[in-house]
Image: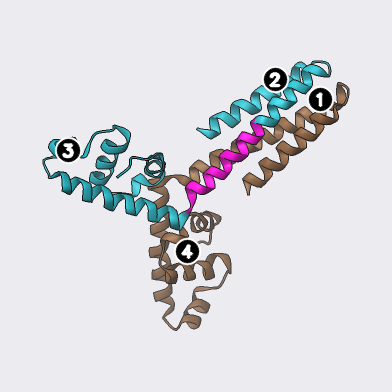
Chain colours: A cyan, B brown
Amino acid sequence: MAKDLEMTILLDFYGDMLTPKQRDFLDYYYNQDYSLAEIAANVGITRQGVRDAIKRAETQLTEMEERLKLVERFREVKKGLDEIMDCATKISAENRKSGLSREINDLTVRIKSIAISLSE
Amino acid sequence: MAKDLEMTILLDFYGDMLTPKQRDFLDYYYNQDYSLAEIAANVGITRQGVRDAIKRAETQLTEMEERLKLVERFREVKKGLDEIMDCATKISAENRKSGLSREINDLTVRIKSIAISLSE
């Protein structure tokens, strides 16, 4: 099992649909970076048991995204926000060239700050 | 049962987690605006049966939002995008006042068009 970023994102989006136990296992494994053996020792079941439980939970998360595609939807939003930030930076540069308007500058700063906070 | 916009939004986000039958019932009822009696006649079960099936599906959708809060997350994004559009409009107005830069104008148009497409 490769620990990948994708699973961390799916866990963030859909984790609350899992049982508390499943969520804990994935949290230990992906967010807190414990090994299967460490989780097994910690919860008192076999390494294979932990592995199976994690696999099942991963399948559930993957299936939820296949159905709902909400992570995909958020990625599109993020891409658009990146482009908005890029436009705001260009406005700022252009504004400096063509006679500085303090108000335009402040508004581009505001746009970038909103776009950054929505991208998180 | 009041037909509300909220349920239409929940159906859009989480509908693919329902069974095809549940999804059809909610689609008839909320999106196509059929009455319970019309759906019952159409699918050949009682009006009460349709009503119960819709109620159960609604509960599932509501519970999914209570857990995942992804509609809430999208609403926050939408609010931020509205504010970005507002800033872009102000930049445009300020740009007209303080000596028109064609490039700044084009960039504000681009920002607004991205924000609109992401809000849909």
B34 or B87: nearer the viewer: B87
What is the C-alpha distance between the residues marked 4 and 2? 48 Å
- Disc 2 chain ID: A
In the rendered image, which quarter is residue A98 located in?
A: top right
Mark 4 or mark 1, which has the lower sequence index?
A: 4
Q: Magenta stretch: dominant SS?
A: helix
Amino acid type of disc 3? Ala
Q: Secondary structure at mark 3?
A: helix
Q: Count neighbours of disc 4 (C-alpha within 10 A) and say few if under 14, some if 14 to 19, many if 20 or more.
A: few
Q: Secondary structure at mark 1?
A: helix
Label of residue B1 in the image: 4
Q: Which residue is mark 1?
A: B94
Question: Which residue occupies the extreme front position in the image?
Answer: A2
- Disc 4 chain ID: B
Q: Position of residue B119 (x, y in %)?
A: 63, 45
Q: Which residue is mark 2?
A: A106
Q: Position of residue A32 (x, y in %)?
A: 29, 32
Observer-side mark, 4 or 1, equals 1
**Same-chain check, marks 1 and 3:** no
**Same-chain check, marks 4 and 2:** no
Left or right of B53 on screen, residue A97: right
Q: Is A74 covered by the magenta stretch? A: yes
Amino acid type of disc 4? Met
The segment highlighted magenta reads A69-85
Observer-side mark, 4 or 3, equals 3
